[in-house]
Image (tube, rainbow, N blue to C red):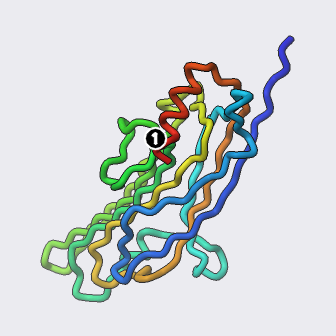
Amino acid sequence: MAKAKTDIILRDRLQFTLDASSDLGLVYGRIDLSDYVNVVKRTGLLVKDVYMQIRDPGTANTGTWSILISDMETLPLSDGFNAYKLFVSARAYENAADVGIASPDVLHVEEYVLSRYTNGLGNQTQDHVHNIYPMRDYHPGGYPVVSDLLVGIAVDTNSTDSQYDSETLEVDIMLIAETTTVTSEQMTQLLTQAQDL
């Protein structure tokens, strides 16, 4: 009877600082997997799931982040749109607008969107959407890697009075993986892909 593999749980925390308008062009953090991959021995990691959490260390008691709080405006009310995109990838993209579930080597994508509309009479409607496109849905058997992974973050905000202007936020990442042996053909393909990191 084959011995069941034990899950490896990897955790990391990255910081990112929004600009004076609460925007952020695409920035990357790197998850170091060098303790688990070895090209000579043809060993890698089979990433089985990814979890991400945005945190606000400035929220003293809980560290809880809210996209709704990020867009609280003083009167008069106006239309607004905030969007945060986070993703984990084995490929570096120049722009987060190019990243989606059909993009090569993307393991996980999350989007937070706040849309606010007014009718000119002081009435306001707010829609808050959190879309998660987890790798377990489109890589159900796991995704083999033999190099580091990248965590991408980008933010679009058109609010005129955001609480998060020039603020530093954090994103926690947890990967669930197991060790795997990689065939020569897979290794060639994965190393070619890893040159983009």
Q: Vertical placement of 97 versus 135: above or below? A: below
Q: Considering the numbered disc 1 on the image, is that residue within a helix, a strand or a loop?
A: strand
Residue bearing the label numbered 1: 106
From the viewer's side, name the closer residue of 12 and 197: 197
Query: Eyeballing the image, is 53 above or below 116?
Result: above
- Left or right, 21 with reference to 64: left
What residue lies at 54% left-to-right and 63% top-to-bottom?
Answer: 54
Residue at 83% of width from left, 15% of height from top?
A: 2
Q: Quadrant of the N terminus?
A: top right
Q: Position of residue 67 (x, y in %)?
A: 43, 68
Q: Report whether residue 12 is seen.
A: yes
Q: Position of residue 188 (x, y in %)?
A: 54, 26
Q: Position of residue 144 (x, y in %)?
A: 60, 31
Q: Is residue 164 left or right of residue 62?
A: left
Q: Residue furthest bottom?
A: 75
Left or right? Give the position of 115 relative to 38.
Answer: left
Question: Where is 150 relative to 161, above or below?
Answer: above
Tell me where residue 73 appears, x and y as whole percent: 32, 83
Rendered view: 118 above or below 146: below
